[in-house]
Amino acid sequence: MIEILAGTDVLYRPHLDLATVTLNGVALGAPAADVPRRSIEEANSALVARYRGGSDSESEYWDAWGNRVSLINFGDFEGNSAP
């Protein structure tokens, strides 16, 4: 596996196999559940409308309809819809 954070010069390779690339130890395209929560500093998604968290508490996320969203839901965005 090729770690991007070890050297971004790998991104200039003409025939880079993205299946071999990791970012902070997580494979590109991996399900959200594979991302260690401690490594998340900020979440941006059209799915996330509200966020609460901090260094002393576990992060929480809500969608535009007020439903609590877990990181597992990010991999299944197409299954979520407005009530």
Image (spheres, rainbow, N blue to C red):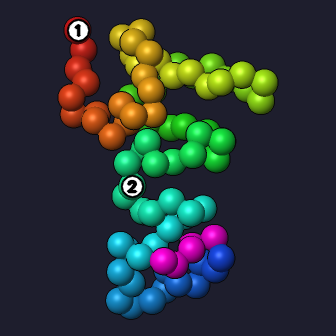
Q: Is residue 34 left or right of residue 41?
A: left
44 vs 80: above or below: below
Residue 48 percent location from the top left of the image: 45, 27
Residue located 51% across and 48% down the image: 35
Residue 26 vs residue 18, the one in the foreground:
26
- Measuring from the top left, give residue 40's x and y in whole percent: 61, 43
Q: In the rendering, which numbered label is found on residue 83?
A: 1
Q: Residue at x 42, y 62 (%)?
A: 28
Place of residue 50 in the rendered image (x, y in percent of width and height, measured from the top left): 52, 19
Please, what is the three-letter code of the amino acid marked with disc 2?
Ala
Q: Compared to 42, does 15 lie above or below?
A: below
Is residue 61 left or right of 54 when viewed as pictured?
Answer: left
Q: Residue at x 66, y 42 (%)?
A: 38
Lower sequence index among marks 1 and 2: 2
Q: Quadrant of residue 6?
A: bottom right
21 to 59, vertically: above or below = below
Residue 22: x and y, percent? 50, 68
First to last magenta residue range: 1-5
**Nearest the eye: 76 or 10:** 76
Which three-letter amino acid code belongs to the residue tagged 1?
Pro
Was residue 44 drawn as part of the magenta stretch in this picture? no
Residue position marked by numbered label 2 in the rendering: 30
Residue contact at pointers 1 and 2, CB within 8 angstroms = no
Q: Label 1: few (<14), some or many (≥20) within 10 Å?
A: few
Total labels drawn: 2
Which of these two is toward me, 3 or 82?
A: 3
For marks 1 and 2, give the CA distance. 28 Å
* Residue lying furthest right: 56
Q: Which mark is residue 22?
A: none
